[in-house]
Amino acid sequence: MADLEEVDTLILGSGQGGKLLAWHLARGGQKVAVVERRWVGGSCPAVACLPSKNEIWSAEVAHTVAQSGRFGTNVENVRTDMGAIYARKQAMVDREAAFHVKAYEESGAELIMGRGVFTAPKTIEVELNDGGTRLLKGEQIVINVGSHAMVPDTPGLAASLPLSHIEALELQEVPGHLLIVGGGYVGLEMAQAFRRFGARVTIVERGPRILSREDSDVSDEVLRILMAEGIDVLLSTDVNHVEGLSGVDVTVRLEAASGQRELRATHILVATGRIPNTAGIGLELTGVDLDSRGFVAVTPRLETSAPGIWAIGECAGSPQFTHVSVDDFRVVRDNMAGGHRRTDDRLIPHVVFLDPPLARVGLDETEASRRSTPVRVAKLPMRNVLRTQATDESSGFMKVMIAPDSDQILGFTMIGAQAGEVMAAMQTAILARLPFPRLRDAVIAHLTYAEGLGPLLSNVPPPAAGWPH
């Protein structure tokens, strides 16, 4: 058995929040070790955020070239080279891996590549990727193990070896027909990208609409945009059985209210949600409680039920965004130093990287209704934003939620070009508690997409009767 090595802080998983914490603590003089089974720096730079947006951008370039005749530039013999797209993405991933190795070296934190399993409350045995084992004990522990794609127990689905977003980003040829199970963020981003690369794409969603967590007008507009690009979307449809092998040939049996049908595809991609990587790592030996879905149960301070053990990121039930994991790092960093930072008072933005993108921050109509919170709603079609007259990017709309009896901005949603950037301005206004007339009457540069905030906020209905204004 390996000799026991003791460190100040031991982190299981090198995802965004964990690696930032490791570098910070090590620079402060702590002895820190990070155990990572596969991806240096975690999934974001290797197989998720950065690689997916890299290929999505390549798809946007392909779409722009295909549409270039509308703008007066004629291009002939356009074709997609998936090998070159993959190579560009992989070059970025390699640069990111090298950056992370250097960051570990410069910080003094030790990165240990291997599979870690708890053998005692604060002790982890690591089966090293290059052979051998190490046994480490930390005065404090951080669980940062992330999550993985869920594969439903549909007969034949697992046996077909379906793609997740990870394998989809490894493709070096355009699928003949890509069938995507799930109409959420990941499924839609992959659908539009591969359609623009030239694949036939079908989305199968068991619910009555895609993006079920968004307002219905948002779902309807995104559906219209995707279908206009030739993507087939089957709603209220279940996948009952799968035969064949993804990447070769699959036959999928579908069931809807209209009856059963079969659909053939070359590839099948599953995007139906994620499962925390908390099983099989010995958490039952630590005193760390899990919730009913298998996520680590944490307080708003990100403390677990076991003293001296923290959890960060997706495995702790935090919203599944890298920017949230970054804030989890700040919460744990400050609380380890005796602070009182919390997760239940933060304003978290969402962006779906479609073209045009969908961005949202704060309250939407669905959540307002669920809370029985009255709101004033204003909406502006993107075609009314003057910038779109120059760019032809007129799909989508802006929508804002205003308190019924004050000028407080409660939330903002946008489908449109540069939505994520425009949303950041509205997020800043919400954080600053800026009354909406101040933003409505601001002098915003012409000709920009953010200029649309003025006309949008001019559409806000008057306050409830009797409110002094």
Image (tube, grey):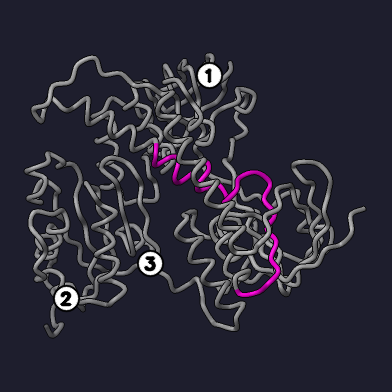
Residue drawn at point x = 68 percent, y = 46 percent? 37
Number of numbered discs visible in the structure rendering: 3
Mark 2 crowdedness (10 Å alpha carbons): few <14, some 14-19, many ≥20: few
Q: Give the residue number, with chain letter if any, for mark 1.
A: 247
Question: Which quarter of the figure has residue 409?
Answer: bottom left
Q: In the rendering, at what x and y percent does residue 155 appear?
A: 62, 25
Residue 429 in magenta stretch: no
- Residue 185 lies, with reference to residue 361, above or below; the image says above
Question: Which quarter of the figure has residue 32?
Answer: bottom right
Gap in angstroms between the C-alphas marked 1 and 2? 58 Å
Q: Of the residues shown, which amino acid type is indicated by label 1?
A: Gly
Residue 50 in magenta stretch: yes
Q: Of the residues shown, which amino acid type is indicated by label 3?
A: Arg
First in sequence, mark 3 or 1: give its number: 1
Q: From which residue to which does the magenta span run?
A: 28-54
Q: In the rendering, at what x and y percent does residue 438 appear?
A: 14, 75
- Residue 7 lies, with reference to residue 134, above or below; the image says below
Residue drawn at point x = 45 percent, y = 29 percent? 86
Q: Nearer the viewer, mark 3 or mark 1?
A: 1
Q: Give the residue number, with chain letter if any, for mark 2.
A: 464
Foreground of the two, 90 or 303: 90
Q: Secondary structure at mark 3?
A: loop
Q: Of the residues shown, which amino acid type is indicated by label 2?
A: Ala
419 left or right, relative to 447? right
Q: Is residue 346 in view from this perspective?
A: yes
Question: Which quarter of the figure has residue 350?
Answer: bottom left
